[in-house]
Structure formats: structure tokens, C-alpha cells
Amino acid sequence: MNNKILVVDDDLSINELIKVNLELAGYTVIQAYDGIKGFALAKQELPSLVVLDVMMPEVDGFTVAKRIRENDETKNIPIIMLTALSQLNDKVNGFNIGVDDYLVKPFETEELLVRVRALLKRTNQIPKSASVRELQSIGEITLLPEQYSVRIGDKQVKLTPIEYDIFNLLFQNHGNMVSSAKLLKDIWGYSPDDDIETIRVHIRHLRSKIDKISNGKKYIETIYGGGYKLNI
């Protein structure tokens, strides 16, 4: 199992603090102090997870995250964005790029470790919800776990690992509402009160992809004040 973590932060003290705590938790840590070196190490080392600061000179964290997502070899590496920026728009920008989680400085090291463990648990295998390798089908919908893809009729769409896990959770509970709290707990491994926007952004991206191959049918329904439901 690859538990190598890349930490990219130009603040030497914070970078070292994260390194020490991750190593105490049993992880192997690689360090970079700027975005250029960070992206180079991501391609070279293919870590199991990247902890990425935003405010760095020359190349910021948003740019690094975008490059990681656009590169075929690194595109599925989970990213935790670590930043002093706390505005909602900054979080949305990160999630729109494909960041998996977002932790605002100052932070408790134990909270970082919880989020690292949750992401590694989810991504150190074929999507956690896919316990068998066979295709799973209901009606026109077929899941392809090893490709992180969904097929509806004769059309297919590639999802990110998180989008696939969200869709699969809705799929397994089709016709019933899945609460936002359950999505946060089952997909991310925690349920903070202030991260509902995390779900909204990912659902918006997921819905846009599914709608493109759904032949006009709206499969994902928002239950306002509650959660989401997949109608098949």
C-alpha cells in the first residue's frame, strides 16, 4: 500500500510541522516548498495524497492542483488544499478544479490526520463501494467501477473518484433520499457542520456530467433541506 504523502507549502515551519505529525502517524513524507517543485515531485513520486498550500510565490496552489488534475499520471491523486483563505469562493474554486478536501489555517494537526486517513481509506483501492468487479446495472444505468465511469444506454461518462463514489452511494439507495450528512460521513469520513458546500459543488459537477448522457432525464434530485435522491 502506498502511503507516501507530498506536502507542498512555502512556509517552512508549517511544512515541517505537517511532516513530523504525518511521520509520527506512520506515513512517508516528501516535501516541496514551491508549486513548481511540488508538481514535479507529484509526477515523479506519484504519492498517494498531496497536501497543498494555496498562497505560494510564482505558482500558486490552485494552478498546481489544476496541473495535477490535467496530467494523466497524477489526475486521480487526492488533494487536500491547505490555506489561510476562508472565503466560500476560494473553497468553490478549489472544488471546481478537483480538490478533494479543504482545510483552513490555523488548523489542528489531528483534524488534518483525520482527513488524510479518510481520503486514503477511500482511494487506496478501487472505489470503496465496489466490492465486486462485475458491472452493476439497473434499468439503463450501468456502473463501471474500475473505470470510474457510468453508462446510460449507449452513452458513457468518466467521473472523478469522488463523483463516482457519490453516484454509487445514490445508486445503491436509488429511490430513497441520501442525506448530506451521510454523504459527508461515507465519502469523506467525517461530517463537519460547515462543509455542506463541499457536497453542493460535487453534486453540481456530477449532475452536469450525468445530464449530458441522460437523454433529457433528470436522474439526480435535490431534496431541499435534506439531501439527494437518484430516480431510476
Image (cartoon, rainbow, N blue to C red):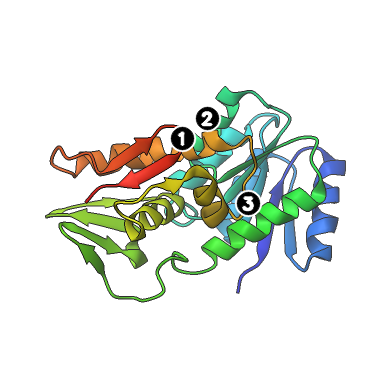
Seen at 81% across and 49% down, the residue is 109
Query: From the viewer's perspective, is the residue at label 3 or at label 1 nearer?
Result: 3
Residue 226, image quadrant = top left
Give residue 92's mark: 2
Query: From the viewer's perspective, is the residue at label 2 or at label 3 nearer?
Result: 3
* Residue corresponding to mark 3: 190
Sequence-wise first label, 3 or 1:
3
Q: Along the horizontal axis of the image, is 124 left or right of 114? A: left
Mark 2 residue type: Val
Placement of the N terminus among the 4 image quadrants: bottom right
Residue 67 vs residue 219, the one in the foreground: 219
Query: Which secondary structure lies at badge 2?
Result: helix
**Label 1 Cα neighbours within 10 Å, binned few <14 / some 14-19 / many ≥20:** some
Residue 119 vs residue 73, the one in the foreground: 119
Residue 10 image offset from top left, x and y in percent? 77, 38
Sequence-wise first label, 1 or 2:
2
Mark 1 residue type: Val
Residue 135, image quadrant = bottom left
* Residue corresponding to mark 1: 201
Relative to 38, does residue 3 appear above or below in the rendering?
below
Residue 42 image offset from top left, x and y in percent? 59, 53
